[in-house]
Amino acid sequence: MTISKKMYINGALHSGHSSASVINPANDEAVAQMSVANGALAITALQAADAAYDSWSNTLISERVDWMMKLKVALKENETHLRECIHLEMGKSWASTQGDFEMLLDSLDFFAGEIQKHDVETLEDKEGTHSHVLVRESVGVVAAFLAWNFPLLNLAYKLGPALASGCPIVVKPSLKTPLSALAVGEICQQIGLPAGVVNIVCGPDQEIGDAISSSKIPALLTLIGSTETGKHVMEHGATSIKRYSMELGGNAPVLVFADADLDLAADIVCGLKFENAGQICVAPNRVFVHSSVAETFYQKVVTRALAVKVGFSRDEPIDMGPVIDQQAWNRIDALVDDAVAKGAVLLTGKGRPAHLSQGAFYAPTVLKDVPRDADIYRQEVFGPVVSVLSFDEEAQVLQDANDTEAGLSSFIFTSDNERAQRVAKRLRFGEVHINGVKYAINLPHCGVKQSGVGVDCSHLSLEEYFTVKRVSTALGKGQA
């Protein structure tokens, strides 16, 4: 064990009340020791944020931006260590850690720019008796619960808008991948960020999460996680009126029409399913392919799956690391077993790759003819499994694609732009990607139905961290 991390509370590093090991799922080895909080310490962190609210929310925007840029510089100086934390806590390929890290820099840059565009908005008074302005003010203390699949990217989605808007924040990273977030806390301490502005606490999900959610201090609870977790947080947050911004589970459909670029479709489907071991909320979950090109598409996906280099190495190029732990491995394998038992055809993969004897590695897997009563059709697999079904009619595939409680991302592949726009209009998902895929900090990331509420990324995300105040002033005689 080479790494030791403490929590960051009220401007100082904190040893907590106990400690826990962080396990690398690639080799089942303990790679770090971390401090752990209990519910009482989580409340202490919230109180520190609350105490910082008045001064931080009233700090000049230019000063907040200066702090954001100071943090960005320090993060860049510590890039190797931050990426190493992700590499070890997830077993993620070294190449993949770069995008995770860079999103944090992008977030600080983007929201520092956006906050400087905020002006007071003037409203018309039809009678001419008053002047009216709308002022955006920091919503208050923010509590952020992070998923484990992109440790720094998920932090980036919350930290940028919180700092820019003047909202002190308490961050709870997952116990499965806490190292990189705790390292950011160390950097905040090193640069002397004002006490209480950022707080990072780790501990048992239910104890820490419930203590934070049920407190009356947070004005906004924001979450990246499963739909069930989202409902749990909202239930416990009902002790007071709060805002919620949540990116929850997905069940993304891919519609590949007969005139699609099959190589492009196969590249994107396999890229999303295998780069992070399929542990991506927007990864394709159900791939619907027109029957006239289905066999060709199957072959292309299988060829790509077989070419994926699975393993764990800092020195060698690796395409895909392990899933997050053995529990996840067992769940994925059970979903594949259920699909096969109900009639799906296993084209390649399943189980542990033959060349790996330890770790939670799952072989890139392709299933065809997945039946609609299979659990993998209804549930988010969150693993490196491509489930393919064929279709004949546009109306039917639209009905099937929308037949899910989730509504995060969806994908269309066709060379017919009229069809693409027609189908996109009828897909009930927060995002529709046509003949490609694009994510960036300036593009809104949002879901409908049971996939969440609110927005991550873009200028729309920043609005989540503000309240609006109307100031109306009566005009006296002689005033214009």
Image: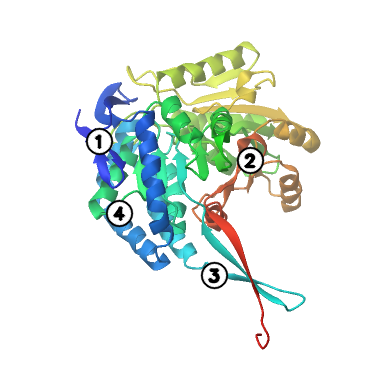
Q: Earlier in the sequence, mark 4 or mark 2?
A: 4
Structural distance between the alpha carbons of marks 2 and 1: 39 Å
Q: Earlier in the sequence, mark 1 or mark 4?
A: 1
Instruction: Name the residue at 47% across, 33% down.
Output: 274
Q: Which residue is mark 2?
A: 410
Identify which amino acid the numbered label 3 is placed on.
Asp
Identify which amino acid the numbered label 1 is placed on.
Lys
Q: Earlier in the sequence, mark 3 or mark 2?
A: 3
Identify which amino acid the numbered label 4 is placed on.
Leu
| Relative to 338, 94 lies left or right | left
Image quadrant of residue 73? bottom left
Q: Which residue is mark 1?
A: 5
Disc 1 crowd rating (10 Å Cα; few below 14, some 14-19, many 20+) is many
Split into 4 quadrants, where in the image is the N terminus?
top left
Q: Which residue is mark 4?
A: 193
From the viewer's side, name the closer residue of 67 and 32. 67
Structural distance between the alpha carbons of marks 4 and 2: 40 Å
Describe the element under mark 3 as helix, strand or loop: loop
Between circles 4 and 2, the one closer to the viewer is 4
Q: Earlier in the sequence, mark 3 or mark 4?
A: 3
Residue 423 drawn at (x, y percent): 74, 45
| Relative to 285, 417 lies left or right | right
**How many marks on residues?**
4
Describe the element under mark 4 as helix, strand or loop: loop
